[in-house]
Structures are given as C-alpha cells and as structure tokens.
Image (spheres, rainbow, N blue to C red):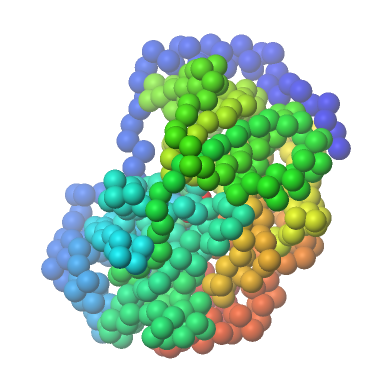
Amino acid sequence: MKRAFTSIATGREKIILFGLFFSLAIFNFAKSEAKEFERNKDVQFLGIESYRDVDIANWAENVKFRPEVVFLPKTKNDLITIVNDAAKHGKRITIIGKGHSWNPLMEGSDYLVSTINLNKVWLNSEDNTVTVESGATIKQVDEIIEPQGYVVSCNIVGTTDITYGGIMATGSHGSGRDCPTMSDYIEEIEFIRSDGRVEVVSEASHGSQIMNAARLNLGLFGIMYKIKFRVEKSFNAEVIDQRVPLEELFKVLPDYLQYNQNVELLWFPFSPEVVIKSWNRTAESKREGSLGSRIETRLTKSMVYGSATRPIIKFIMKHFPNSVPSLTKTLSKGLFPNAHYIVGVNQAIHYVNEAVAYPINETEVAVPYDFDDLGSVKMGWDAMIKAVYDNAARGHHPLNIVVHMRFLKSSNAILSPAYRNKRTCYMDYGSYYQTPGWLELVNEIWSTWKYIPGVRLHWAKDMRAYKDLDIHRMYGAENVRDFLKVRNYFDPSGMFANDFIRGLFEI
Ligand SMILES: Cc1cc2nc3c(=O)[nH]c(=O)nc-3n(C[C@H](O)[C@H](O)[C@H](O)COP(=O)(O)OP(=O)(O)OC[C@H]3O[C@@H](n4cnc5c(N)ncnc54)[C@H](O)[C@@H]3O)c2cc1C
C-alpha cells in the first residue's frame, strides 16, 4: 500500500487557501442550517397544519422530492385523519422525522407526514422506561430524563437532533461491547395502521416474531405514534482517547475490545495515527483531562464549528475538494488529542454532536466478529484505507473526512444488520457532501466488502449507490419473508411502501 503521500494541496493552492481563509474571516456568512418547510405556502388541509408544493431535501441533500402535501400533525387523531383520507383517495404515505437518513425511505409524491410536532415525553421511573411521541429527539428526551438521573446508555453517537421514530425505524445503533442496537430497547410501539386502526404492539401481546419485525420497520408498518423503550440510571464514564500508529492498530485492538466496555476507531485520511476512543463505567467523580488537551480541543472546536469560520471551511471543502484531506488531517489532531477524563456517560457518547454542521455522504455496513477473530474487521478496514491511498495516487480524494468503526453486541430485530451475531462491528466512512467521485468510491470499497462473510448494509445509510443489491441474500431469504408477512398484516394495502422499497423488496 502506498503511504508516501504526504502533501495533498500544492504550494500554490496552499497560498490561495491561506489567503481565502483570512480574507473571508472578516465576513460572517453564517446562516441557518435548518431545512425548514417554506412557511409561505401553508394550508389547513383536513384541519391539520400542512404545506403544498414544497421541495423537500434530507440533511445530506442526496434525497430531493416534492410531495403533494406535507402534514405537520400535532395529535394521534391528526394521524388517524391523515391515514383515513389517504385510504379514501388511494394516496401513499411516507414519513419524515429530522430527515437525517441517507436512504430515500421518506421519498414519495403523495402525502408526507412530518413528526416534528409530536414530541411529548413521559419518564416511567417505576419500570425504568420512557414513552415518547415518535418525533421526540434525543435532545428533547434527554432534557426530561437526565435531570431525573436517567440515560439512554447505548444511544447513537453522531447527533442528538434526530427523532426516536427515525432511530428505531432504521435500526440505528450506538457503540458498546454489551450494547444491542437501539431498536432492541423497545418495549412497546403504538402504530396507526393503513386501515386507520390504532394497534399497540409488544412482545407480550403479539409474540416475539411480530415484535422483532416491528422493532426495525423502515416505516412500512404504519405511523409510529408512541414508542416505549428501556432506559437506565445515569453513570459516569472514564474515557481514554489514544492515538496509535496505523500499523499498530490490529496488534492492540483485540485487547482493547476485550477489556473495555466501549471502543470506537476514528481515522482521518492520511493521518499516520488512528484515534482509539474507549470508555468504561466508573464510580469516580467527573474529572477534566489535562489542561493542554483541553485547550487544544477547545481552540480547534471553535475554529471548526465557529459561526464565522465554518462557512469558510465549507467554501474550501466545496471548491477545493483535493485539499479537504489536509484540512481534516490537521484539524482532527486538535479535535482528538491523547486525553484521559471522566464525564457523564451522555457526554462520552455524543462527543461529535457539533459535526452535524457539516453535511456528509456516508455509507455503513455491519460485519460479525469475535475477540479472537478480527479477520472480517481487518478486511473491511484495509479496504477503506487502501481506497484512500489508491485514489490519492491517481490524484483523487473521494474519501476525505473519516473512517469509523464501532463495536456492539447484536440485535433481535429481524432485518437488523446485527441480527443474531455473536458480536458486531459497524464500519462506515464519510466524505463532505457533493465530493466528486463518491459513487465510484462506494463501489470500489464494496468490491471487497461484499466478500466479508455476513456483511449487511445499515438501513439509515444510502443503499442506492450499490449496484445489484440482493436484499434477500444479504438479510436472509427467510428473514425477509417473515418481515414482509408481518408488514402485510399491518399494511395490506401497501400505503406505506414507496417506490424505493418496492424495488428493493420486489413487492
Ligand atoms: C450527523 C448524523 C449522525 C448520525 N449518527 C448515527 C449513529 O451514530 N448511529 C446510527 O446508527 N445512525 C446514525 N445516523 C443515522 C440516523 O440515526 C438515522 O438516519 C435516523 O433515521 C435519523 O433520524 P431522523 O429523525 O432524521 O429520521 P428520518 O431520516 O427523518 O426518517 C427516516 C425514516 O424512518 C421512518 N420513520 C421515522 N419516523 C417514523 C414514525 N414515526 N413512524 C414510522 N416510521 C418512521 C421513515 O421511514 C423515515 O423515512 C446519523 C445521521 C446523521 C445525519
């Protein structure tokens, strides 16, 4: 593998970038990042706040569409009204939370139901569960449960601005040796079915087969109105961020995985080191890291995420894509220095919350592994690193932000990429959105990934980039059949299946 590549931007490019950085710094280009519906076209269709003829884009802007009506319901009755009207007029329904998925599950041309106004939260401390309306975000739930001493300890990592409806429907996951995926924490889901009936599903009422299909439902079983899931008492985490030489990674990784509750790997293109983040539960009090590491992180964070500098970095990323790796490599050193500290577990989990400021393309698979057999993990890792250096040798930089790995247990959700594994490694990589060569990169890495035994794609990430996907083979023909049988029970009319799903599942 070619490792000699050191300088990405040419000398001239560097001077231009340097000049740009400082000349643009005097302007403040900051503008709202939120993709709001255009508020000037609202109607009160069916007595519900709604919008006609508005263009919808997801966060990464890789899914764009124009539904006939966008509904913003506020109550369960609103949801029932929408479904009954759709049934009467033969309309299809798709659902959107915060639109942070890359897969076009929300895409549709009839009715789009947004859950952003459905965000009530109830903590049930007598049985350590929380019940949420499906549009409640991680942040909104934490604001209620944290002050009362509770936490969602295996929660997703990347952002707190996503809904539990979206998290559960796509089988999203966090990280942790003993963690299942988020969908596995569900105790009960209240669905609005395509016939307008309300059906509350739990293992006790419907049995494990139906429940394990409903946990990760891709929005195909109806609209989830409420979700009840397990939480636990909050605790502190002792975090160690360690930079290790790239060549050493697979020598030290087995011990890291065996002896730590939580391990994540981050590699920023062309860095000679990998960041290994690990944490364990501790009874000790919170303790800050060294002064040096704190100053380094704070300064870099304010530069990367500050409202004045962020637009400049975005400008550079958009117009000088070949210099993105130099930026990432340099800035990531400041963001992730060696450090040792104790924080509340939520802080340990959501350590990259600000990253949502930079839209990226991302794709992800899960592969099975065990402590004494990291063959599949290494195969997946090497394919990503090799793609970075091979492309650089050709003068391309389609993988320019991060290579990332997380280590979990397994899942009981029938369509989960972690379904019934002993242990699961989720591996992903991401580039700044609209980076040239992304689709070619995905297929280049897939040409190796597809041979990893048990490899399965994560439903939240874009699957359209992959050619000739055989869903039945990937998730198991029997599992897909069982899933579709349960889906047919909830939605016999196919109201909730969009064209993307119909093509993928051949329904
Ligand atoms: C910055 C960032 C960080 C991320 N980090 C992680 C991570 O650490 N781990 C991980 O696994 N994933 C991660 N993701 C992916 C994310 O968890 C999923 O894409 C999740 O679905 C996003 O939630 P959302 O509210 O944006 O859902 P949306 O993208 O709006 O919705 C996705 C789909 O879920 C279904 N759905 C949503 N609500 C309902 C409902 N009420 N009823 C029925 N179906 C519904 C619909 O089919 C909908 O189209 C990340 C994404 C981003 C952008």
Q: Quadrant of the C terminus?
A: bottom right
Tell which of 51 and 424 is nearer to you. 424
Q: Quadrant of residue 220?
A: bottom left
* Residue 113 on image: x %, y %: 31, 65
Up the image or down, 141 lies above or below 224; here it is above
Q: Quadrant of residue 468?
A: bottom right
Question: What residue sits 67% from the left and 77% below the top?
Answer: 476
* Residue 3 on image: x %, y %: 83, 30
Q: How many marks?
A: 0
Q: Is residue 315 visible?
A: no
Question: What residue sits 46% from the left and 79% below the top?
Answer: 211
Ligand 1 picture quarter: bottom left
Tell which of 471 and 236 is nearer to you. 236
Farthest residue to the front: give it: 283
Tell which of 228 and 332 is nearer to you. 228
Horizontally, is 399 left or right of 1 in the view? left
Q: Quadrant of the N terminus?
A: top right
Question: What residue sits 67% from the left and 61% below the top?
Answer: 423
* Residue 77 on image: x %, y %: 19, 74
Farthest residue to the right: give it: 1
Up the image or down, 126 lies above or below 143; here it is below
Horizontally, is 245 left or right of 25 in the view? right
* Residue 62 on image: x %, y %: 50, 51
Horizontally, is 409 left or right of 60 in the view? right
Question: What residue sits 13% from the left and 68% below the top?
Answer: 47
Q: Is residue 302 visible?
A: yes
